[in-house]
Image (cartoon, grey):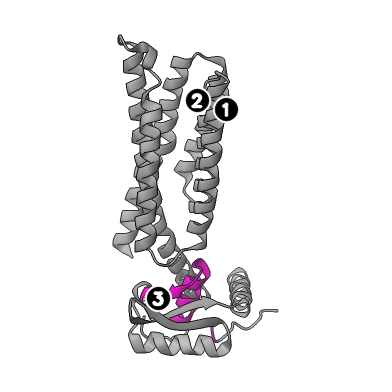
Amino acid sequence: MENNEKNLTALESIEVIERMIDNTRTNYGKQRSFYYLFWGWLILTAIVLQYALLYSKFAEYNFLPWPILMPLGMVVSLVYSYKDRQKEKNETYLSHFFGVFFSTGSLLFIIGVFICVNNNISPNPLVMLISGVYGIVAGRLLKFKPFIFGGIVFLILSVAANYVGGETQLLMLAIGIVTGYLIPGYLLRSKSKENAATA
Amino acid sequence: MLQPLDPILHSELRLAIVSLLMAVKDADFAYLQEKTNATNGNLGAQIKKLEETGYIKVRKGYSNNRPQTVCEMTEKGKKAFAQYVKNLRDYIDRG
């Protein structure tokens, strides 16, 4: 950007504004895709392990992948987020809001799962409900429709899960993870890479 | 009736700086330079002009023993930017 006194047309001005704001959003999209892909694969692994345990001689311990993998995921996410903050010196309003929203949401998630488990209620519908809200909010903020679509699928599954048994709920959760976390996560990552290449 | 566009903001580099600062809480000189691809001198001159107009606030300090210039939008700057975008929309709608 050299000729700072160049006469801009109204459209050129809009393009400059969009390009600069997109620039900050692109970086953020790349960071966010990590969380969706990481958590997507982690939850899917927990589901597969729980299924495997259900049909093994250790069926009574089928719940074990969750209390082991989920805290591990939280530690990895916290370390990643800390390193990211060190690297990215300038916090955008978008990332600030995401930080507040997701940390409050995670607290809601942990307390909600605790209440369900303590009352012998399956936490799966609640997990799908919170994931659906996460997806829709993320999709609206990043202006990225695959997250909104995945969020809506999660919300539908969270209602439907109330009418099926625990094993079918796990299958529904797996479907929700693929449509709400993994597919949008990979699409966001590839879009961010494309934008970075053309920037 | 169309309002004239603010001449301070209606310049490619100054508009780019202000657009970036609208998205972040604050930004240092290196960040602005990386995002705008502007030269040191040009960026410094435009930051000074925006500061003199009262659209941005500039803090000079040190980070890791190196001088650091950090910029952030002022309320006056935010209002001017909002008005500029509104006027741009009017131009496009009627154009």
Which residue was labeled with disc 1? A115
- The residue stretch that appears in magenta: B8-31
The image quadrant of residue A50 is: top left
Which residue was labeled with disc 3? B32
The reply to whether label 3 and label 2 mark residues of one chain is no
Nearest to N terminus: mark 1 or mark 2: 1
Relative height, residue A97 to residue A137 (above, below): below
Task: Name the subunit of mark 2.
Answer: A
Quadrant in which the N terminus of chain A is drawn: bottom left
Helix, strand or loop at disc 2?
helix
Relative height, residue A128 to residue A24 (above, below): above
Instruction: Confirm whether residue A103 shows in the render.
Output: yes
User: Who's the residue at 31% across and 55% down the image?
Assistant: A193
Gap in Å between the C-alphas at discs 3 and 1?
Answer: 47 Å
Gap in Å between the C-alphas at discs 3 and 2?
Answer: 45 Å
Label 3 neighbourhood size at 10 Å, few (<14), some (14-19), many (20+)? many
x%, y% of residue A136? Answer: 53, 42
Helix, strand or loop at disc 3?
helix
Principal SS element in the magenta part? Answer: helix
User: Who's the residue at 35% across and 34% down the image?
Assistant: A42
Seen in the image, is A100 located left or right of residue B38? Answer: right
